[in-house]
Amino acid sequence: MMRELWTTLRPTAFGFLGAVIAIAAWFILSGAGFIPGASSRPSDDGFEQRVRDYILANPHVIIEAVQRMETDQRVAETGELGQLIRANNAEILNDPATPVGGNPQGDVSLVEFFDYNCPYCRRVASTLIQIEESDPDLRIVYKEWPILGPNSEFAARAALAAHRQGKYVAFHKGLMLGSGLVDEARVVTVATEVGLDLDRLRQDMEAPEVDESIARNRALARVLRIGGTPAFVIGDRLLPGAADAKVIRSLIEQARPR
């Protein structure tokens, strides 16, 4: 019975707190006779009664057990993601249509999947610039992944078109460091500020290569099981969310060749 309950309520399906409460409640209430069909007397060998008594006296063991299970699961998932990253390494790092910043010949790459209208991407943008400026051997790979609607799609297409004029990084930072919605008006303003040819920009935005680049990024994000923006690939690690500089720098150093 206990094995069946644990399988049903494992943390991945029920949540950490729910599993703790449910398991503890099962032991306590079944012993008190409150669960329909559950016997209030101990089993023939008294094992369940002894387990129940131990847990009542030491409730922290349930928390420790669930934490251990969650840790083991995270380790397994990290290992599996590492295999996926290594299997798709060429597309992650060396897609010729993907813009690259920082030091293109750097010894370690930071790959970012982002959306120009993602507030968390905007929040971490200044941190990434600080890391880039302090690390002359960092290569930055920009994966345009517009997931927040037509304005984001327009901005991503404009950014890839700006890459054709050799001004991608300046345009990218101009959009990321600005405030407010990144829409067509904002795109035109930043494009003018960084000196882009607007007529050529609009023409290049419709190039099939732009469609193909965004489609490849979307497919790659699915393969890597990325659930939102921003998301970073550093070495064989996937870092979701707007992490702080300390965490990002730590992963960069771990990925750096020795």
Image (cartoon, helix red, strand yellow):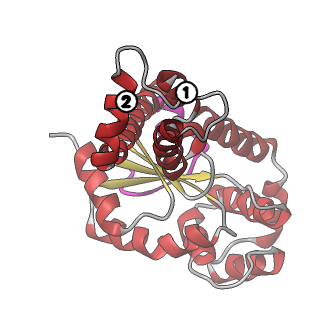
Amino acid type assigned to the residue bearing label 1 in the image: Ser
- Indicate whether 190 appears above or below 46: below
- Indicate whether 132 appears above or below 224: below
250 with respect to 15 (left or right): left
Q: What's the distance in space between the residues labelled 1 and 2, CA to CA? A: 11 Å
Q: Secondary structure at mark 2?
A: helix
Residue 164 figure quarter: bottom right
Query: CB under 8 Å between callouts 1 and 2?
Result: no
Give residue 31's position: percent from left, percent from top.
48, 37
Instruction: Look at the image and say whether residue 160 sits in the magenta stretch.
Output: no
Question: Magenta stretch?
Answer: 89-104
Pick the residue in front: 99 or 128.
128
53 with respect to 231 (left or right): left
Residue 198 figure quarter: bottom right
Amino acid type assigned to the residue bearing label 2 in the image: Gln
Q: Residue at x 70, y 84 (%)?
A: 180
Which is nearer the N-term, disc 1 or disc 2? 1
Instruction: Look at the image and say whether residue 96 sits in the magenta stretch.
Output: yes
Q: Residue furthest top?
A: 44
Give residue 130's position: percent from left, percent from top.
35, 74
Give residue 98's position: percent from left, percent from top.
58, 46
Could one spot residue 211 in this view of the protein?
Answer: yes
Q: What residue is disc 2 on?
A: 49
Give residue 71's position: percent from left, percent from top.
35, 40
Q: Residue at x 24, y 46 (%)?
A: 254
Q: Residue at x 65, y 36 (%)?
A: 222
Residue 188 figure quarter: bottom right
Q: What residue is disc 1 on?
A: 39
Q: Residues within 10 Å of mark 1 (few under 14, many from 20)?
A: few
